[in-house]
Amino acid sequence: MTTDAPGPLSRAENKLERALETAQEQVRRLICDHPAQIPIFTAAGRWHFDEDAWAPPWTGGFLAGMVWIFAERTNDPWWTLQAQKYSELLEPRKLDEGTHDIGFLFTPSWGRWHRLHPSDHTRDVIIQAGRTMARRFNGAGKYLPTWVDPGSTFIDVMMNVDIVFQAAELSGDAALADIARQHAMTTRRFLVRGDGSTAHEGWFDPDSGEFLRTATHQGFRSDSCWARGQAWAIYGFGSVYARTRDERFLDTARRCADFYIEQTGRRRIPANDWNDPAPEFPYEASAASIAAAAMLQLSSLAGPQGSRYREYAAGILERLCTPEFLGSWEQGYEGILKHAIYHRNNNLGVDESVMWGDHYFVEAVHRMTQGLGKAAGG
Ligand code: GLY
């Protein structure tokens, strides 16, 4: 005789469920105490609401994205209402030509909304956001430039090509998919090194398209490997493989993941940059939460070899679910994931919680507790 009753949870599953409950409570308090405000990082554990002192606003999608995950998990209309409200706050940005971070804004928010409750409106917003991102394309160098300069691209931009693929699929405009694919090929060629490590930034001559050099803003130096950039690469190339099924992107995602694993080992949480010989802070926990979400995605794409990435991601989450890394309001801490770093060199959000660290932690734990079926976006 069979029964539909769920079996008892293992200790690890229990720990993940408790971590999600804590995360949900932290976000509920943030929404209730600071309605419609979108923080970037904490200062001494308290959310900080000043404008981003480095980049054009790029983090709004992470709060909306967490709220959509809680809406999906709970089926509670309050969470769905909040998820819609926080996504709607971002809608005008679908026309923002001043940033390359359109995917960070729209994939976790409107992308999840469309997956859960598709409508003509969600479809149109995603198509417009993807078209705006694609308009940045530099045809000579075949890359999507950053807000820094028409000659610059970042490894982070790999997280912003999926919105272009989504727009291509929803509109049937194959030219959009081609732009997204070309950017990924250029990044693979110039920003991913032979050992699977990544450079943060690539510089091109924007007129001729000639590749000039690598550089960094948030890492140790131009020839080093910034840990969060590496995690963006694992996630970004995995997402491009999920859209294109071009094995070269799966190979790149795997080589980037293997480099992360090789460099970090049983410690699981890297410092800000693997090449910094004396990091001032031992951890950049947001790199680890992104890597966990990225490796769970990769494990669902990589066939029999995927179990290596699932096991490593489970180890990352086990460590992040300890009191050393998990914040709670009762202890006067407002973020979810402690010990992340936004911008060490500019002294922004150092050894604090950052919105994307919290978001990808919630996404990874959610993926882990739900099984691994979905490829991109959690
Ligand atoms: N701008 C993306 C990052 O700081 O990771």
Image: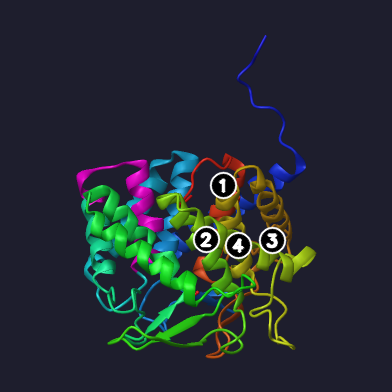
- Mark 2 vs 4, N-terminal side: 2
On whether residue 209 falls in the magenta region, the answer is: no
Mark 2 surroundings within 10 Å by alpha-carbon count, few (fewer than 14), some (14 through 19), many (20 or more)? many
Residue 368, relative to residue 4: is it above or below? below
For the question of whether residue 282 can be seen, the reply is yes
Residue 329 visible within the image: no
| For residue 35, side relative to residue 357 (left or right) | left
Q: Which residue is mark 2?
A: 235
Q: Secondary structure at mark 3?
A: helix
How far apart are the two marked residues, 3 and 4, measured between alpha carbons? 12 Å
**Nearer-N-terminus badge (3/1):** 3
100 to 29, vertically: above or below: below
The residue beneath circle 3 is 320
Q: Position of residue 33 (x, y in %)?
A: 45, 64
Distance from disc 4 to disc 1, alpha carbons, whole Å, reads 13 Å
Identify residue for label 4: 291
The magenta-colored residue range is 102-123
Amino acid at dot 1: Arg
What is the crowding at mark 1: few (fewer than 14 residues within 10 Å), some, or many (at least 20)? Answer: some
First in residue order: circle 3 vs circle 4: 4
* For the residues bearing labels 3 and 4, Cβ distance under 8 angstroms: no
The mark lying in front, picked from 3 and 4, is 4
Q: Amino acid at mark 2?
A: Tyr
Q: Residue furthest top?
A: 1
Which residue is nearer to you in this view: 62 or 137?
137
Marks 3 and 1, how far apart at CA: 15 Å
Q: Amino acid at mark 4?
A: Ala
The alpha-carbon separation of the residues under discs 3 and 2 comes to 19 Å
Residue 277 at x, y percent in the picture:
74, 88
Instruction: Identify the disc placed on residue 367.
Output: 1
Residue type, label 3: Leu
